[in-house]
């Protein structure tokens, strides 16, 4: 059975509240879970102690049994010092593609040539 430590969403529309749960990975996000391990309230300020609450003993128990935390939960565990910091992919979404970079270089070259041409006359 593939176990995950993940978030199960609760709360009303536009007022999210999450439970940190140990669940079978095949179960739905807000569906059946085996144990509730804590809570996460994203509406509270980041420095608030009540923003993320976890029963560290039970979390460690599930990690020892082979449960894999999701990305968001692993960030909580890294902040708590339970697991080591992972190397994450630094996606460069803002960098344009190769063709766009070539077009930009061509435009820059034309602009430089236009500036030099009147100076020679």
Image: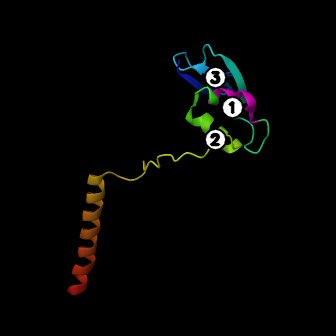
Q: Tell me whether circle 1 and circle 2 mark residues in contact (CB < 8 Å).
A: no
Q: Quadrant of residue 53?
A: top right
At x 59% / y 36%, what residue is drawn? 72
**Closer to us: mark 3 or mark 2?**
2
Residue 5 image offset from top left, x and y in percent: 61, 27
Q: How crowded is mark 3: few (under 14 residues within 10 Å), some or many (20 or more)?
A: many
Magenta segment includes 66 = no
Q: How far apart are marks 1 and 2 (CA)?
A: 9 Å
Q: Distance between the residues labelled 3 and 1?
A: 11 Å
Q: Mark 2 points at which residue?
A: 83
Residue 103 image offset from top left, x and y in percent: 26, 58
Q: Name the residue under label 3.
A: 22
Magenta segment includes 52 = yes
At x 55% / y 16%, what residue is drawn? 28
Residue 79 image offset from top left, x and y in percent: 68, 44
Which comes sooner in the sequence, label 3 or label 2? 3
State the SS at label 1.
helix
What is the number of the mark on residue 60?
1
| Front residue (pair 57, 29) | 57
At x 72% / y 43%, what residue is drawn? 46
| Front residue (pair 89, 59) | 59
At x 52% / y 47%, what residue is drawn? 87
- Residue numbers of the magenta segment: 51-63
Q: How far apart are marks 3 and 2 (CA)?
A: 16 Å
State the SS at label 2.
loop
Question: From what the image shows, is residue 36 above or below residue 74?
Answer: above
């Amino acid at each position: 059975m593939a176990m995950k430590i993940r978030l199960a969403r609760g709360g009303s529309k536009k007022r999210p509240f999450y439970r940190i749960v140990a669940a079978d990975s095949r179960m739905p996000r807000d569906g059946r879970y085996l144990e509730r391990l804590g809570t996460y309230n994203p509406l509270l300020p980041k420095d608030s102690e009540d923003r993320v609450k976890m029963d560290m003993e039970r979390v460690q128990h599930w990690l020892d049994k082979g449960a894999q935390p999701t990305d968001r939960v692993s960030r909580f565990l890294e902040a708590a010092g339970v697991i080591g910091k992972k190397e994450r992919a630094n996606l460069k979404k803002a960098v344009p593609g190769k063709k766009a970079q070539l077009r930009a270089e061509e435009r820059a070259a034309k602009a430089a040539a236009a500036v030099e041409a009147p100076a020679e006359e």
